[in-house]
Amino acid sequence: MAERPVVLETRGLEAWYGESHVLHGIDLAVREGECVTLIGRNGAGRTSTLRAILGLTDRRAGSVRVRGQEVIRLPPHRIARLGLGYCPEERGVYKSLTTHENLTLLPRLGGDGMPLSEVLAMFPNLAERADSYGGRLSGGEQQMLAMGRILTTGARILLLDEITEGLAPVIVEALGRAVSLLKSRGFTIVLVEQNFHFARHLADRHYVVEHGRVALEIPAADLAEREEEVGRLLGV
Amino acid sequence: MSDITLQAFMAQLTVGLIGGCFYAMLSMGLAIIFGLLNIINFTHGAQFMMAAFLAWIGLTQVGPWLGQPDLQVNFWLALVLAPALVAVFGMAIERTLLRRLYHLDHLYGLLLTFGVALVMEGGFRYFFGVSGQGYEPPEILQGPVDVGFMLLPKYRVFVVVASLLICFATWYLFERTKLGAYLRAGTENPRLLQAFGINVPVMITLTYGFGVALAGIAGVLAAPIMQVTPLMGGSLLNIVFAVVVIGGLGSILGAMVTGLGLGLIEGLTKVVYPEASTVVVFVIMALALLVRPAGLFGREA
């Protein structure tokens, strides 16, 4: 693991929404093919971290490197084009586009995007709803769509925000299978997850975020013995 | 009412249809611009006027200016060049002025575009005066044609066919193509679209240019029908805004259908109760807003 290159790195990443200072120096380093989680309480700054990496916050400072390239001054579309796929917390399925249009909308960011047929095999529900408008899909279908559409782009670094939130267990299971499949194919995954039970089986490392900073970094192997420490930080 | 002949009825309906074509083209441009930019483009009427003037200048002024009286930019060339020039002018305004206002309230964009419209109208008034200039339709479209129930100038038939084609093409582009899918997605959530790798700022500039070009095409088409004057756009725009509100702000189909429909209703009113023909559009607007505040085709009610 240690030999693989770091593909996503933040150093002292700070971010603001208007006047409110939400990130106070986030340090992350994610290696190629790794799956890491950002865990923490609501409002700790996990979603803001993903948004700040992509340049979606109002203002940001510090350093963000994608495959070694500094992107702190680049606009969001230039950052995405380095091969980042983003699945936002609110899912962001386009309601006025059909499922098929949503799936084929995003521009190609790399050479080896997953063929549409493979995405549909991973999420068969989407094939049945191909001509339905995004606004008519159920929550679970919207989540599969939000996940599926970034896989076709060829993005190799996936930022997934709360993909299990509010979904039925059977759909959470399907998403879990999808994430482990992606991991086995060498995708680099940053997972923001409230459902720690879901995340702990998928991740190689966990970052505990608190008050806009990384409070703790724990390799998956050490998780069992530090359960209490993590529990205290998460407030469970 | 029984003394109204079928012929008079059809004639007014046809006049209404021609008016409706202009409403539809103008309101589609407004709807597209509002959808993506969130700006109510008050310059739309002035841009329509500017294109008509460019066509007139090309036909009658450019030759003498250059000392070559025989040089004319004919109608067909103007139909391409004038909208393109107006679009470039519009995109320059978007890049230099409008862009600075996106993070502010709608009101600022409205004020700015209104101000630009006044400056443009004032400029044309200063150089060309307020009296109307005539514009001869191209020779091939001069003279009448028998459309069955009446004799109609060929040019007006051409305007109806051309604008219906343009409206349909615009609707098709927006609703049925990949490019349209980007526009619809950008209308819904531009920030996220940019996070997916689309250069949204450039898309916004081009979309503004496209909406303005639609106004430009309408302007050139209008030149032989209406008097070319600096004020020709402003008066039309009042009705076009009502059309956009009735159709639902940002709805392309709504703008097209409402524009054509209101033109017909206006024509009909001229037959039944001519005194009401100038207010009927606004009465319908008030009623439509009472029943459906988001407009007849508005997506969020």
Image: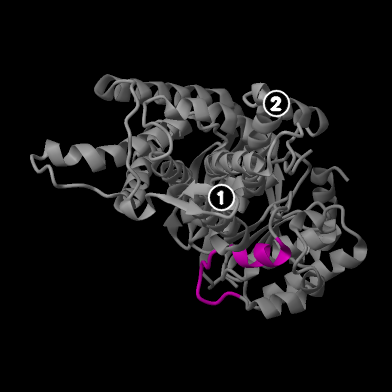
Q: Residue at x 68, y 46 (%)?
A: A47
Q: CA distance from mark 1 to mark 2?
A: 64 Å
Where is residue B235 drawn, in percent x and y? 50, 25
Where is residue B168 drawn, in percent x and y? 57, 56
Q: Residue at x 52, y 29 (%)?
A: B237
**Chain hosting mark 1:** A
Task: Give the residues in magenta.
Answer: A98-113
Q: Based on the picture, tell me whether residue A101 belongs to the magenta stretch.
A: yes
Q: Based on the picture, tell me whether residue A40 belongs to the magenta stretch.
A: no
Is there CB contact under 8 Å for labels 1 and 2?
no
In the displayed structure, does residue B258 sit left or right of residue A61? right
Q: How is the image coloured?
A: one colour
- Return the residue at label 1: A53
Mark 1 or 2, closer to the camera: 2
**In the current view of this chain or complex, which residue is farthest to the right?**
A169
Q: What is the secondary structure assignment of the residue under circle 2?
A: loop
Q: What is the secondary structure assignment of the residue under circle 1?
A: helix
Q: Residue at x 46, y 31 (%)?
A: B45
Q: Residue at x 81, y 45 (%)?
A: A234
**Chain hosting mark 2:** B
Q: Is residue A233 visible?
A: yes
Number of residues whose C-alpha sits closer than 10 Å to that of mark 2, classed few (under 14), some (14–19) or many (20 or more):
few
In the displayed structure, does residue A80 sit left or right of residue B220? right
Amino acid found under the numbered disc labelled 2:
Tyr
- Return the residue at label 2: B273
Q: Is residue B218 above or below residue A30?
A: above
Amino acid found under the numbered disc labelled 1:
Ile
As rendered, which of B209 and B239 lies closer to the eye? B239
Where is residue B101 drawn, in percent x and y? 49, 29
As rendered, which of B4 and B301 lies closer to the eye? B4
Q: Is residue B110 above or below residue B38?
A: above
